[in-house]
Amino acid sequence: MSGVSLEVLTARAEPGASRVPVVFVHGICHGAWVWEKYLPYFAAAGHDGYAVRLRGHAGSGGDLHSAGLADYVDDVRSVVGKLDRKPVLIGHSMGGAVAQKYLGEHADSLAA
C-alpha cells in the first residue's frame, strides 16, 4: 500500500444503499476538491463516493516532484483496498491515465 498520508473526501449514501461505491481520481493541477459537487449527487443515488487527493497535492503527503504514475496507481490501490466492495473508478485527465493503468494492473479489484 501507499504508506503516504492521503486526503480522501467522502460522501456516504443512506444506510442500506446497495449500489457500488465510486472512487474519483483528479487530474494534474487539481485535487480531490474538483469532485466535491459530484460526491453528494452520487451519494443521493445510493453510491458511497470517495475522491482521493493524490500524493504531493495539497492535503496529502508525499513529494509532487518525485511522484510518478506508478505512485498514483499505488495511491488509488490504497483507497480501493480499504473498501468493503469493489468500486467503479472515475478519472479525469491525468486521473484517467491513472485509472487506466490501475485497471491494467488490478482489474479484479474493480466492479466496472
Image (cartoon, rainbow, N blue to C red):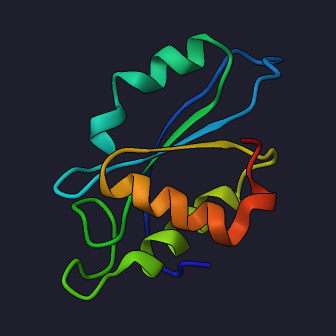
- For the residue pair 40 and 5, the one nearer the viewer reads as 40
- Quadrant where the C terminus is found in the figure: top right
From the top left corner, tell me how far across and down residue 55 is, in percent: 35, 70
From the top left corner, tell me how far across and down residue 28 is, in percent: 22, 58
From the top left corner, tell me how far across and down residue 14 is, in percent: 69, 15
Q: Name, please, the residue furthest toward the top.
A: 44
The residue under the point 38% across, 54% down is 95
Horizontally, is 1 left or right of 31 in the view? right
Q: Is residue 26 above or below residue 55?
A: above
- For the residue pair 37 and 28, the one nearer the viewer reads as 28
Query: For residue 51, what is the image quadrant?
Result: top left
The residue under the point 34% across, 30% down is 36
Q: Name, please, the residue furthest toward the bottom.
A: 66
Horizontally, is 107 left or right of 76 in the view? right
Q: Is residue 74 above or below residue 108?
A: below
- For the residue pair 57 and 101, the one nearer the viewer reads as 101
- Quadrant where the N terminus is found in the figure: bottom right
The residue under the point 35% across, 34% down is 35
The residue under the point 63% across, 60% down is 103
Q: Is residue 87 above or below residue 4?
A: above
From the top left corner, tell me how far across and down residue 43 is, in percent: 58, 19
Horizontally, is 59 left or right of 10 in the view? left
Query: For residue 16, what is the image quadrant?
Result: top right
